[in-house]
Image (cartoon, helix red, strand yellow):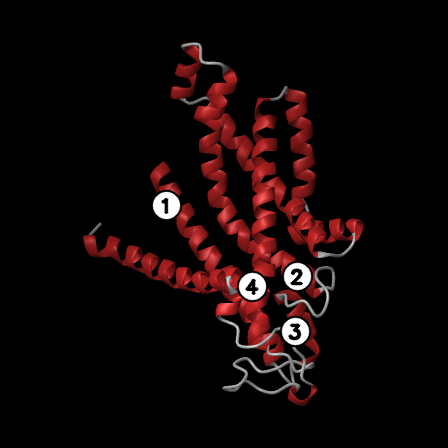
Amino acid sequence: MSTTTVARPRAGRIAALSAAGAVLAVVALAAVAPGLLATHDPLLTDVRATLQPPSAAHFFGTDQSGRDVYSRVVYGAGRSVGIGLLATGLALVVGVVAGSLSAVAPRWVDAAAMRLVDVLSAFPEFLVALLVVAVLGPGPANVAVAVTLAAVPVYVRLARAQTRSLAAAEHVEAARIVGVPAVVVHMRHVLPGVVGAVSVLATIGVGTSILAAAGLSFLGLGPTEPTPEWGLMLSAGRNLLLQAPWVALFPGSAITATVVGISVIGRILRARAEERGA
């Protein structure tokens, strides 16, 4: 294979990574310090400025209450991305712990745990999250819990597989032979590898969690008005697509750009991990 042939995919990967990184940097800034980017109070209503199109005064126009859509999109980043990160982080921790324990547990315990994982995996994550919210009730905290529970099975399965694979590695066997306690062997030689492998998957999972949380908010199961949140804003603009499409267009674009950016970075990281493991 020629050097030029190898360089082209690398150049494309670098370009995609740069574009995704730039998008996510803006989103991160909006989530951490929205006051630096926002131009208006996201909760300020003005009945004289309802449904104004994008302009120099209102970059993304105004909604049916006269609120600045651009500022609401900026402030909504913290809630939408925050729920996704929280849910993914919790799912990662629960998945690693449950998967690792299942891998070293007695056979009947492992079999029972895997059957439960199989049942949960048989349903789409969004449907599982929807059912959990239906039981717990609406609200931002319950949405985070629902998205976490929906994502856990994927991490449990991967953590279990990685634990079994690493437990049979030569350096782990050598540590056991020289008398290192089993708990120390697991914590020092097995768990770091499991966390590393699951973390790559979690990078992609953040985008899925953001999308699921936005979907639940769109259905009215998350934050309530007048909270600026992307899914809720998208829901508020769904009946205005012909009259004022910008009300739904910009929060929808923010969700799309963020999820795509996270997915691009996650897939590149996974490809690199697979290349190193090959």
Q: Badge 1 local density, few (<14 within 10 Å), some, or many (20+)? A: few
* Chain-order first, disc 3 or disc 1: 3
Q: Is residue 197 left or right of residue 63?
A: left
Kind of residue at disc 2: Gly
Q: Is residue 175 left or right of residue 137?
A: left
Residue 192: percent from the left, percent from the top?
45, 31
Vertical arrangement, residue 246 with respect to residue 117, above or below: below
Q: Which mark is residue 215?
A: 2
Give the CA separation, mark 2 to mark 1: 31 Å
Nearest-to-viewer mark from 2 and 1: 2
* Chain-order first, disc 4 or disc 3: 3
Nearest-to-viewer mark from 4 and 3: 3
Q: Which mark is residue 43?
A: 3
Q: Badge 3 local density, few (<14 within 10 Å), some, or many (20+)? A: some
Q: Which mark is residue 77?
A: 4
Residue with the mark numbered 1: 272
**Residue 209 in view:** no
Residue 213: percent from the left, percent from the top?
64, 57
Cβ–Cβ below 8 Å for labels 4 and 3? no
